[in-house]
Amino acid sequence: MSYIEIPAYAKINLSLDVIRRREDGYHELRMIMQTVSLHDTVCLESAGEAGIRLECDTDAVPCDRTNTAWRAAELMFGQYNLAGGLRIRIIKRIPAAAGLAGGSTDAAAVLKGINELYALGLDTGELKRLGLQIGADVPYCIEGGTRLAEGIGEILTPLPDLSGIDVVIVKPHIKVSTPWVYSQLDLSQVTEHDRPDTEKLTEALANRDLKAASLNMKNVLELVTMRRYEIISYAKSRMAQAGAEACLMSGSGPSVFGLFAGPEKAQEAYAKLSAHREWECFIARTV
């Protein structure tokens, strides 16, 4: 085998709680994460000539060593002394800098793809260990599905499967710096009302009760990002008006997603929300 294509799925945060700032500067998190069908396609081809070459169908992401996909390939080639080179082509569908783990999921796809392409035989645990060297979300992107993520996001616990829920996502035409959002979060000002009840949310999701889930689908980073960018509050209100059973900002933003009770309602909402020039709009399902 010399060529492989790997789907790289986006993620949404069904909740996000920041517990504390750690001594190493990272934040201790507790959040429920879910993959959705919106995905990039990562194409890998082994090459006789040494070195990594990366190309992408958009200028929105870099095609050099600052790209997480490149770093993932470099890590694997160095770790396992792989001969020759690698050509990476990314077909982007996940918007960049959106709070949907677009970069992390591409890196995860490269790790999984190289493992298969070069028959390395690495298990999921080893791939996640390698992924953590690239970024905190990469281990989750390797596993995917419905997971409780703790630590900096690398401690993953499987939750009851939530696949098959219809999702609409809007990504406003703004860029949000994740480090800036965390730097502006004052945990002393976060109340219990701002935090999700993860146990109640887990129970509601297990019952696929979206209305009950909506009561505890909370993201404490909204306290920072929504205060700075009014468009996110507007997107949430429009999503709710379009019929979402529950809606939330994903990650540090700016994307907002809504969960819908069936494909017809999701399609209707997508049609309404796509008419707005303030954002890109996507329709998907949980996977």
Image: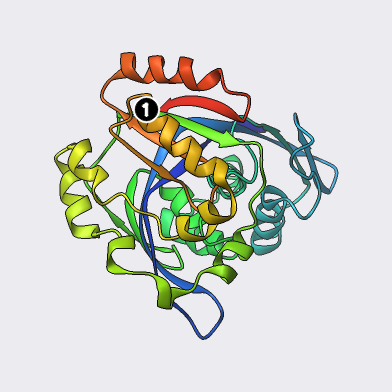
Q: Measured from the top left, where is residue 120 in percent x and y?
A: 55, 51
Q: Measured from the top left, where is residue 254 in percent x and y?
A: 56, 45
Identity, as a three-letter code, of the amino acid under mark 1: Gln
84 or 113: nearer the viewer: 113
> As displayed, is residue 198 above or below residue 159?
below
If the image is split into quadrants, where does the C terminus sit? top left
If the image is split into quadrants, where does the N terminus sit? top right
- Residue at 84% x, 48% y is 50
247 or 121: nearer the viewer: 247
Is residue 251 at all visible to an observer of this figure? yes
232 or 52: nearer the viewer: 232
Q: SS at mark 1?
A: helix
Q: Measured from the top left, where is residue 92 in percent x and y?
A: 65, 31
Look at mark 1 in the image and give the residue it sits on.
241
> As displayed, is residue 277 above or below residue 115?
above
Q: Measured from the top left, where is residue 247 in percent x and y?
A: 36, 39
Is residue 286 at all visible to an observer of this figure? no
- Residue at 56% x, 79% y is 25
